[in-house]
Amino acid sequence: RFCYLDPYKGAQIAFVECMRNLACSGARALAVTDNLNFGNPNKPEAYYLLKECVKGLADACAFFDVPVVGGNVSLYNEHGDGAIDPTPVVSMVGLIDEAEHVTRSQIEEEGLEIVLLGDLPSELGGSYYLQTQFGKKEGIVPEVDLEAEKKVQDFLIEQIEQGRVRAAHDVSEGGLLTCLCEMLFGEHSLGAELSIPSLGLSGRLDALLFGESQGRVVIGVESTQLAELRSRAESMDLPVVSLGRSNSSGKLQVDLAGEKIVDLEVSSLQSAWENAIPKNMEFARS
């Protein structure tokens, strides 16, 4: 989606999301491999997309000092209706120094503080929400700030290694609300009571909940560790938004400036999430 609209930024988003996923598990990136899928490069528009994607990946690799150790290219992917969307696939390997630093994406304890690193999402362009709900691939692609990405990831790994982070999940496809739901899809039927202070910079509810602004991570932290974590974040000029706590209710409840906007059973959300592909296949057959 992103590479179709802005191949340079789209490729960098693929790269930094891989790095962010590694950081959420407690790992530092070591190397990357890529798989570049494009249309006919003899056509100027396809060549431009390929060139800009490669440049975006190369600049990100240079900034983070992560080498490309392998990969492949698939070109001339076209059919009667035109070429496929430009699709750079990025895979990355990282290292976690100590086994006790391995961090899961699911929250497995009640009473954890749920905290957003980075400011509230505010960009809706190119989002999965626009594509699935309105059939649109359009808009301004979210900005990629490599310095901000590095700050978030370095802070996250530091806090994991200091034992303060019990769960971590990046805000990516589907946005903030999808991230929060997925963090509750664990083994213990937990819930969460959350409060978002405002709509954020966009002033839009859809951009807040489903926008895919980059450089955001949601973490679960023990209450006794929150003050030190916040103090360290402030010293790094890293925005931190406290959202609420996990609980044993089995419900995801979200308030926005005092008004309830989400009140759903986590089990029903998880069922919809797990059965999305079979249901879509049934719909396609009908």
Image: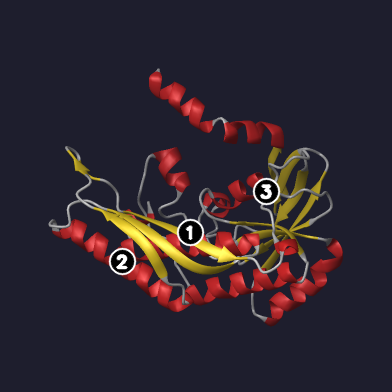
Precedes in sequence: disc 1 or disc 2: 2
Q: CA distance from mark 1 to mark 2?
A: 24 Å
Q: Secondary structure at mark 1?
A: loop
Q: Secondary structure at mark 2?
A: helix
The residue beneath circle 3 is 183
The residue beneath circle 2 is 54
What amino acid is at disc 2?
Answer: Val
Quick one: label 3, few (<14), some, or many (20+) residues within 10 Å? Answer: many
- Front in this rendered view, residue 88 or 223: 88
What amino acid is at disc 3?
Answer: Met
Residue at the left extreme of this rendering? 42
- How far from the left and from the top, in percent, is residue 189? 77, 38
* The C terminus - image quarter: top left
- How far from the left and from the top, in percent, is residue 99? 72, 62
Question: Left or right: where does residue 38 sit relative to residue 245?
Answer: left
Query: Where is 158 relative to 112, above or below?
Result: below
Residue at the bottom extreme of this rendering? 235
- How far from the left and from the top, in percent, is residue 16? 48, 65
Query: Where is 236 relative to 20, above or below?
Result: below
Question: Left or right: where does residue 264 sit relative to residue 74?
Answer: right
Q: Secondary structure at mark 3?
A: helix
The residue beneath circle 1 is 123
Q: CA distance from mark 3 to mark 2?
A: 33 Å
Foreground disc of the pair 1, 3:
3
Based on the displayed image, in which of its 4 quarters is residue 265 positioned? top right
Residue under the point 38% across and 40% down? 135
